[in-house]
Image (cartoon, rainbow, N blue to C red):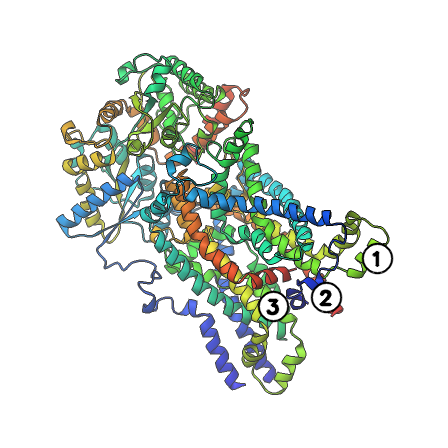
Amino acid sequence: MGVSRRVALAALGLGASGLASCSAPVWQGFGLDAVRPAADDELLVTLWGTAAERRAFTALAEGFRASTGIPVRLQAVPFSRRGTTVDTGIRAGAPPDVFRVTYNDVGLYRDAGVLAPLPDSAALRPAFGEQFWAAVTGPGSDTAVAVPHHTDTSMLLVDTAAAEAARLGPLPAEPDAAWDWDRFLDACRRLAALRPGRAATAVNWQSDGAYRWLNWVDQADGRLLTPTLDGAVRPPDDGLRAALDLTRRLFDEGLVPRSTSTSGGVTTDELFSAGTVASAFVGNFSLGDLEGAPAWTAVPLPRAAQASADLGGNALAATVGPRTEQSLAFLRWCVTPENMAAFCSAASALPTRVDVPATALRYPTAPDAMSRYVAQAATVRPPLVEQVTIPRAAAVTAELADGLERAFLGDPATPTADLADGLAAAVDRAVRR
Amino acid sequence: MTRARSGGSGSAALHVRSRGSGSAALRVRVTVTILVIVWLLPLYWMLVTALSAPGVVAAGRQPVLPDAPTLQGVRTAVGEFPFLTWVANSAAIAVVAVAANLVMSLLAGYALAKRRFPGRAAASVFVLATLTVPAEVLLIPQFDLVASIGWVNSFWAVIVPRAADAFGVLLARQYMLSIPDEVIDAARVDGAGELRILLEIVLPLCRPVIAVILTVSFMYRWNEFAWPLTALPDPDRATLPVGLSFLQGQYATDYPTLMSGAVLSVLPVLVLFIAAQRAFVSGLGAQR
Amino acid sequence: MRAVRAHASAWLMLAPVLVVVVVFVAYPLIGAVATSLTRDTGLGAARGVGLANYAELARDPVFWRATANTIGLTVLLVPLVLGSGLGIALLLRRLTRGRAVLQAVFLAPYVVSGVVVALLGRTVFDENVGIVNRALRGVGLDGVAWQSSSGAAGLSVLIVLVWARSGLAVIVYLAALADAPRTQLEAAALDGAGPWDRLRHVLLPHLRPTTVFLAVVVVVETFRTFDVVYVMTGGGPQHATELLVTYSYAQGFDARAQGYGTAIGLVVLAVVGLGTALWWRVQARTEDTAVVER
């Protein structure tokens, strides 16, 4: 019996080897060591991006290493996984040292107290556009908790041949000359009539892009959130209702593919490249991905009471941790005028600094269109920026996506006013939760 | 009982075979052929799409028979993300987890099936009841737990909590129940220790169920998604299914790339499945 | 003394499983109950809110939608998977050759990961360029809005799940049919009973325990369905394909409402626990009968 018990213990040891040997050195380098040692001075940078953007980040990281000797590991995740990756890192006590963050998400992390403030905020501030700086400081603060790395916005890409065939006339180039909503609807109807089965356009409010719908609200001089940003405007104002009415009509009249609702798994640039739609709202960062697309023209976003464009683009944030100093140095490195110009050029992005000269931006793809995007980005309005950068912005975007999808794909007979009320109520709850 | 069935699907059991006309037999064959085609079509389509050019697929002009196969999708899938790392991660996790799972299942199965000790009934109920808790509902607290151990992004986070698996314990217990007690009692009378009985008498009889536990457990570990997605957020630590979802996040409708990744990820499990099919099928067949 | 030692060694054999279960299942379960009573973004400190999350569940239309979807999917999937499994098994049973290969064909979708199944589902059912809609348009019909219409999206998930999960039922039924009561079947045939009567009056009663087992497996698998829906539809459109587990994940991780997401998970657990308890009783009963038979 004694023998058998020893054997039993040995076997148990084998069975429990998973528990016992978890820190055995033999496993190191085999991918079983959980958190890298704190002594390591390598910076972990979590990001997402198109192939061009990731290449541009690699260039930044290599330049930083050459200049400071600090190695940088880039951790590329899909856009949809960005939050979970960073959040789980924070929860596990091992957040990335630096992470790319949308302007909408900055507030959330700032509120959670995980971002390292930039001590030299005051010195950096004058170099940046006001609306971008506001997005990384938050209301009532002068200290930035992230640097505005670049901005993006959307324009309407129109298949040039289709535009001619549909007799749309000369296409506008400047935001001041943009089509008004009626003219836009008319253009869509003409494009849709060209070829059955091909929709007129697709709007880029998928994959956390529902906040872009607020462009339409702002164009009609409406607001989703109250001026104090502590809730939704209730009942919804005329601008919001008009925007909902117009965008619902796109679906009800079949002017956009039904798969392009807010939860649709498509991207508008892919649909445009594939010829599924005759025009598409596309962000400048996707211009490099338009392989196989027909010849196109970038047309400014439609306007109503005023022109308004979405605050796209991203900031870079550093977390509080053992490598905060190096992380902040990396942030500053990424936003020097030269590096910003190089990044924006390579990644088809728009600068956030006011001192990056236009001549420094050499866009390899569609340079003419990019200059139009620069003009469009000037119509990003502070009243809209403050609404999409509140700490609860992610929750608001999720509620927007839900409410819009109900309006877009639901029963067309439901009055717009009811849908707008429901949307405002849900957003209000999300802000106050 | 279970053991008798596991080998019993041979033709001898086919006693009520159609004794009707040849046309009935033909009807069966035709129906089966149609069903087989329906079942295989998606897999065929996966392969064809993987070998098509992205532009052709996106434009909806992909031919049903590939006319110009290209490895463009494969190159994107393997080149843009650490695909081979995912394969290695999945393999490392599967091998260690399957081994741990097998040892623990056999030990626990033997104890529950062939040992008489106070608390056995309670232990059976407790283990089997807790093990059938769907892992998907415990993602958040389990994540907090492995985070406090420091296992986030460590393979241990995926291996250890899954080392005890309801299916394995159940299979081992059910199978061992069918081994006559007399054999074991005789050994006990001879003074053999319990572990020796398990190793020298019971295990040699258990070869079929061991094969089943190995294959089923490999399948579960290789295919698991929700938990590795949660516990291994670093793309360099991702397993294949998680990596595939990353590919999908990046290339939403680039179907050739997605299908290339899918084809590459199912190959190992299909190969293993074909190799171990007999054990697999008899094992699953015995489960009722 | 000997008995004590023997007991100790039995418990030692159980110990690895017990340790893992207690540490990684039972303990988190208690943690889950605690978390479900808080408001927790996962970033800052959690705040106790009592039963507020459960109260909110009752008011949350998406939760009820996900509940209805989960139950509806189960109610549809069980007969479909069991029916197609039994049908295919009955056909295969009448073939003398190639049965091993055919079993492999029907089981293949069952062994590939749910993520691959889901990616395949997206590819095949893409409403713009998928092969299904191309085929429909090819014969002059309209394409179906698989991604944007609620009913169609649900149907596409259902079809994919039937395809992926029938294989198990085929194999298990085939094994059960192997020891069908031969004499009864022959007697029934002599009495002039047609194939349908023989199925109803002889085979189905014989297969009853198998059917119960498979039904439980399919129910539990359906309640755990996460990967297929998460990757194929993301629960959309308009939560039409949202299940309780995907909603729990979406709330707990994507929406950073960990307390709320955990509360949803616990509801799933309660339902599955109930089902498991029922199965346990049935299982115990059949086991007793089996022992008696032996």
> Element at badge 2?
helix
Q: Vertical placement of A120 versus B262: above or below? A: above
Query: Is residue A52 in view?
Result: yes
Bin the neighbour count of mark 3 within 10 Å (Cα to Cα): few under 14, some 14-19, many 20 and up. Answer: many
Which of the two labelled residues, at mark 1 and mark 2, occupies the earlier sequence position? 1
In front: A242, or C52? A242
Residue, disc 1:
C187
Bin the neighbour count of mark 2 within 10 Å (Cα to Cα): few under 14, some 14-19, many 20 and up. Answer: few
- The quadrant holding residue A48 is top left
Q: Amino acid at mark 1?
A: Ala
Percent x, y of residue C43? 37, 46
Percent x, y of residue A194? 42, 17
Residue, disc 3:
B173
Judge if badges 3 and 1 mark residues of a common chain.
Answer: no
Circles 3 and 1: CB atoms closer than 8 Å: no
Say left or right for C284 vs A388: right
Marks 3 and 1, how far apart at CA: 37 Å
Q: Report the residue at 42% width, 36% height from top.
A: B57
Chain holding disc 3: B
Res A385 label: none
Chain holding disc 1: C
Percent x, y of residue C105? 56, 52
Chain holding disc 2: C
Percent x, y of residue A143? 22, 38
Circles 3 and 2: CB atoms closer than 8 Å: no
Q: Amino acid at mark 3?
A: Arg
Residue, disc 2:
C290
> Element at badge 1?
helix
Say left or right for A297 vs A223: left
> Element at badge 3?
helix
Front label number (3 vs 1) = 1
